[in-house]
Image (cartoon, rainbow, N blue to C red):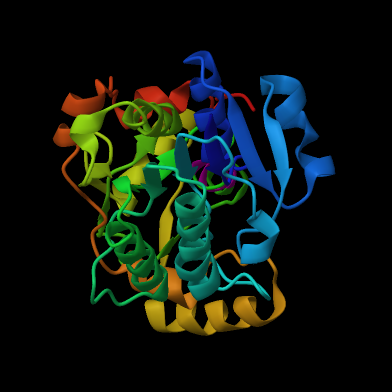
Amino acid sequence: MIVITGATGFVGEEVVKQARAAGYPIRAIVREPERAQWLAERYGVELFHGNVLYAPSIEGAMKDAKCVIHLVGIIYEWKENTFERVHAQATRHVIDEAKKAGVKRFVHMSALGVREKARSRYHQTKWAGEESVRKSGLAWTIFRPSFIYGPRDKGINTLAQIVRRLPFIPVLGSGNTRIQPISVENVAKAFVGAVRNDESIGKAYDLCGPEAFTWNELYDKLQGILGTRKKKIHLPLPIARVQAAIFEKFLANPPFTRDQLLMLQEDNVGDPQPAEREFLLQQQKFEEGVARYLNRDA
């Protein structure tokens, strides 16, 4: 039995799909079972009603489990869902419950760029979550994914809609920092592969694609896939920060935040080779991976 948090999300569904294909029974901790019923119907997942923000609500969730895959995370804050609560406190709650139940194996979702003295609160709290995992006494493996793309992603699909619909392409800042996107299929393959891979215990892996490129180049690649030729217009960061502050105050799903602008000012790249070797990941170029689901005529 594998217990998964964040199973209803974009990455979570792919992890569930691949774990079930590998023959693992799955229990998913979900806040709203009625809205997660599709997991049970589609993949035969056992649903456990609980919220990792509240430790008492997940008591008993790990019964008879051999491994926990902890995927819960957010990219912006809203109401009770703060970075500190979701990335740091909730991780401690899941670890504590796993230890009570005698679970030995713990596979954790972090993020590329995480480090002790990071500028952004997103990275700071992700680091705090990692520290709890490292100190847990469990047989842990940590993965640090880059920008993840796939049919259900809210990143590349959103950018593609911008490229399709606007008469120009807005770029935050210079657009010269680099990213290294990876497919959701490879991310999930690594997580599921780690469950029985004892060689990965006590290690942290970058999960990133085979090529790094700038945000400007990303938009060029999307234009090549979508068949458009539009001018890029750069929004200076000081203006973007003012806009972000307004978005954060009034919108539940802001286009971008001040914390994200901090992250945009640094490269988000890593070394894909250790994970590729350990989990036999078959990588492909970004354009090839994205073209699978971005329909030129959509």
Residue numbers of the magenta segment: 156-161
Q: Is residue 229 visible?
A: no
Q: Is residue 160 magenta?
A: yes
Work out which quarter of the rendered image holds the C terminus and state it: top right
Chief secondary structure of the magenta span? helix
Q: Nearer the viewer, residue 199 or 14?
A: 199
Q: Is residue 78 above or below residue 199?
A: below
What x and y, as percent, mark residue 233?
A: 43, 62
Quarter residue 273 falls in: top left
What x and y, as percent, mark residue 180?
A: 28, 44
Q: Is residue 227 left or right of residue 43?
A: left
What x and y, as percent, mark residue 34?
A: 84, 42
Q: Nearer the viewer, residue 89 or 212?
A: 89
Q: Is residue 78 above or below residue 214?
A: below
Q: Is residue 119 left or right of residue 251?
A: left
Q: Is residue 84 magenta?
A: no
